[in-house]
């Protein structure tokens, strides 16, 4: 398989994984499972909060990879 096809396949797989990661239904299932585990005493308040924070992060758009411009001002 030519290298360009391997790279193209990698991009397709990455895009599919990203789509699955940010799927609202998947995030909702994760939250429901965490809430059930919390209600059953299987996870702590802190662990539930951590899962909730991760779920929010999954739904937010990924930040752009841009660096802040240097101002040259001394602190």
Image: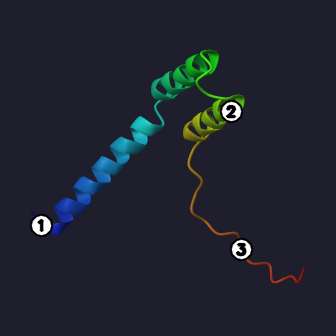
Quadrant of image for the C terminus: bottom right
Q: Pick the residue in front: 12 or 31.
A: 31
Give coordinates of residue 22: x percent, y percent: 48, 36
Q: Residue at x 52, y 21 (%)?
A: 33
Residue shown at 9%/63% (left/top)?
1
Of the numbered discs in the image, which one, if any, rests on residue 12?
none
Q: Residue at x 20, y 65 (%)?
A: 4
Mark 1, mark 3: which one is toward the viewer?
1
Q: Looking at the image, do the residues carrying marks 1 and 2 touch, with CB atoms under 8 Å apart?
A: no
Decide which of 72, 27 is in the foreground and name it.
Answer: 27
N-term-proximal mark, 3 vs 2: 2
Q: Is residue 39 left or right of residue 8?
A: right
Q: Quadrant of residue 19?
A: top left
Query: Of the residues under marks 1 and 2, which one precedes in the sequence?
Result: 1
Q: On the image, numbered disc 3 is attached to which residue?
A: 69
**Earlier-in-chain disc, 1 versus 3:** 1
Q: Is 60 displayed left or right of 18 in the figure?
A: right
- Cα–Cα gap, marks 3 and 2: 34 Å
Residue 43, position as x, y percentages in the image: 61, 28
Q: Residue 70 placed where, x, y %?
A: 74, 78
Name the residue beneath numbered marker 1.
Answer: 2
**Most distant residue in the left direction:** 1
Residue with the mark numbered 2: 49
Say which element carries label 3: loop
> How many marks overall?
3
């Amino acid at each position: 398989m030519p290298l360009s096809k391997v790279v193209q396949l990698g991009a397709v797989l990455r895009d599919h994984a990203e789509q699955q990661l940010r799927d609202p239904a998947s995030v909702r299932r994760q939250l429901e499972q965490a809430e059930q585990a919390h209600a059953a005493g299987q996870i702590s308040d802190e662990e539930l909060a951590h899962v909730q924070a991760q779920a929010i992060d999954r739904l937010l758009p990924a930040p752009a990879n841009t660096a802040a411009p240097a101002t040259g001002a001394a602190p």
